Image (cartoon, grey):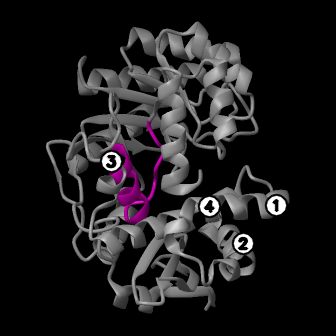
Amino acid sequence: MAIAEVEAFQMVWDGPNERPTAFVKITTDDGIVGYGECTPMHGGIHVLTIIANMLAKPLIGRNPLDHAVIADELLHKYMKLGPDGSLTAALAAIDIALWDIKGKMFNQPIYQLLGGAWRTELPFYTSLGQNAHRTVDETLREVEKRLKRDEPSALKIRFDPDRTTVDADIANDIAKAKAVRKLVGDSFPLGFDGNNGYSVAGAIRVGRALEELNFAWFEEPVQHYYVEAMGEVARRLDILVTAGEQTYTLQGAADLIKAGVKVIQCDPIKMGGITGVMRCMALAYAHGAEVVPHQTQPTVGHAANLQMMACKMHASKPVEWNDPVERNTELMETLLKTPWTRKNGKFSLPTGPGLGIELDEEVIRQRKRSVASVS
């Protein structure tokens, strides 16, 4: 068996504000198809361009079961593109597609090939963004809508501030946290995502307030590239500080753990796909930390995340289900032949071969905008 074709493409959705989503499709010479997903930032065009112009041709003729060797070869061959970003994300999409092929070859779900599942029902948290731009009352109304619609096991409020400023409105941020806690009650699990919006001093102030409000975690309180500062906040607060969604390498994850961060949020469609995140999970486990991936995409990315998280021992946090809800619902219900089912705040682990999902090829044909197809 060998890789016969690699196609990098965007999926275009309706509406003036709808950004495209980005995928890679890999087909073997005996017709097995695997899908991977690219980071959606800026429509994923930067990642698709790397796949189309640099990575696709070297894949042709390779054994798809050599996915880890292929990833390391291509990472080092094209290292000067910069491993912290587009190159690693491109390799992530390819890796997920090759794992999908591998599962289909052996007629097994990926979690079985990873060693088996500790759980088949995975609690999820709903992630509600753009709260920096809302009033307290507007934030509460959005929280109410999200809880009613998703019925999650936990909720994270994100602020998505302008990353060129810090500590812009700490008092109002804390007021929103207090209001949300009052709305959902004392025991409902809550997370707070600072989206890199605070200085160390500002993060400490917000973190102390979150501790009083019994929030479960405080995500990326300071700029992600200040690794030591992130660690300082983690060490000085009792609340669990999480970080790593913009960490693309195993070495970067090691630096965060060394700094004092105990939950690493590497993203499977950014950090080397399933192979990359599983390596990160082993690293974290060896150092008493945990991986709880950042994951925003409702189809292929979500399937890859569930396959991995089912295999994690000592899981303490739910998986992510991101907003915008309307966009994710359209993607899920349009692209998946069988949309996800959620019950009692949990997703059921897909048990079909590979990623365990079936994409609608006719929808792909209608909405596809190819960047390149190499065979």
Residue 40 appears at what percent x and percent y?
56, 63
Task: Calculate the distance from the C-alpha at mark 3 to the C-alpha at mark 4.
Answer: 20 Å
Q: Are marks 1 and 2 in contact (CB under 8 Å)?
A: yes
Mark 1 or 4, which is nearer the eye? 4
Determine which residue is flagged by label 1.
81
Tag 4, which secondary structure? helix
Residue 366 appears at what percent x and percent y?
43, 92
Q: Which mark is residue 69?
A: 4
Mark 4 / mark 2, whichever is N-terminal: 2
Task: Calculate the distance from the C-alpha at mark 3 to the C-alpha at mark 2.
Answer: 32 Å
Q: What's under tag 2, amino acid-wise? A: Ile
Task: Calculate the distance from the C-alpha at mark 1 to the C-alpha at mark 3.
Answer: 34 Å
Which of 196/35 is in front? 35
Task: Calculate the distance from the C-alpha at mark 4 to the C-alpha at mark 2.
Answer: 19 Å
Q: Which mark is residue 50?
A: 2
- Quarter occupied by residue 62: bottom right
Determine which residue is flagged by label 3.
115
Image: magenta residue range: 292-309
Is 148 situated left or right of 89 in this image?
left
